[in-house]
Image (spheres, grey):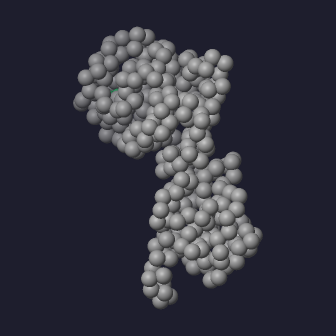
Amino acid sequence: MNRAITKALLDHYDREHRALPWRGCSDPYRILVSEVMLQQTRVQTVLAYYDAWLERFPDVEALADAETDEVLKAWEGLGYYRRARNLHGAARLIRERPDGGFPDTYARLRSLPGVGDYTAGAVASMAFGEAVPAVDGNVRRVLSRLFDEAKPPASWLRWKASELLDAERPGDWNQALMELGATLCSPRSPRCGACPVVEWCASHRAGTQEQRPAASVKAKPKKLRIELAVLEADGRFMLERRPSQGLLAGMWSFPEVGVGGSVLATIAERGLVATAHPAALPLVEHRFTHLHATYEPWLVTVATPDEGEGRAWIDPATSNDRAVPVAQQKVLALAHGHTAVASADPGALL
Ligand code: SF4
């Protein structure tokens, strides 16, 4: 049965697969970039970044040579920025390998930062033809349905994926399984009528496909309210570089008001002088993986902008080369709009 499933799905993949820029390529760097970008991110979103990234960092050497700011800026808007820092770290590690070559086995790839079981399996099979499975969320759903397994443990998934693997075409096979999960075997309303493996699908027979895999109980995201001091001087706004560890590490954001602190105290701590009372801007909501943040921005005009280490004054009307997280970009746009209205008509916001 396994051979029949494998053949039917591979034939279908050969006929129907979507043309994506990373398909049909065996360059491990390009495959790694696509796989890291696709983690927790939709294909459509990645398509808007992939080519631009490769133009800027065409190979491991170019990425390894880049500054962190440049890497984070190129990733700006893709979210989960740790992925960019890990990719950067991986490029630097690869460059330092004694033979200078790209790690060419699952085990060697697994030792790179940010490369887990799935990514190592995907790159090893697609770039080097190693017969290893690659189990992502799509593959988990397909296997769970194909064998009507409600709560498939990781070891079972790996075993089943290995059993079905086509040893001659492991890269295509892994992509065929993922493609089935991304297209026909979708989380809701799978299109079983068009599925190439429907005749072997146990959950289709049992009518349980929509309940497979069983929904897991997810922890509720923690809620956090963060006051921001949005400092403006001469039409520019002050951003600070975030610490190199933790949330949004190394990116640029507005100063946060510490617990029990105040906006004016935050300004004074930075040696700046407010020339007006803080004005409340609209709240900005943003969801991180395990966190739901509500940003509460306060706009304050300060005297002369003071440059300093880890500090930048941004003119929102011109492009800047610093990586600014999406929520902070929204705050910047709100602050810019507010000051533009205020300077055009000083009474409009009273
Ligand atoms: S028959 Fe339906 S549930 Fe089964 S693998 Fe195909 S699309 Fe998924």
Above or below 23: residue 169? above
Ligand 1 is found in the corner quadrant, namely top left
Percent position (x, y) of residue 115?
58, 30
Residue shown at 56% from the left, 45% from the top: 70
Nearest the camera: 278 or 16? 278
Closer to us: 219 or 43: 43
- Horizontal arrangement in the rendering, residue 244 relative to residue 338 (left or right): right
Residue at (46, 28) in percent of width and height: 31
Q: Position of residue 192 (x, y in %)?
A: 28, 31
Tell me the residue at 31%/23% (across/down): 13
Q: Is residue 217 left or right of residue 244?
A: left
Residue closer to the observer: 205 or 69 = 69
Whether residue 181 is situated above or below residue 340 in the rendered picture: above
Q: Residue 127's spot in the image, x, y percent?
A: 46, 20
Looking at the rendering, which quadrant does residue 267 occupy? bottom right
Q: Residue at x 63, y 17 (%)?
A: 99
Residue 143 higher or lower than 64, as above or below? above
Q: In which image quadrant can residue 198 be found?
A: top left
Q: Relative to 236, does residue 136 appear above or below in the rendering?
A: above
Residue 323 seen: yes
Quarter of the image with the N terminus in it: top left
The answer, for residue 135, to whether it is visible in the render is: no
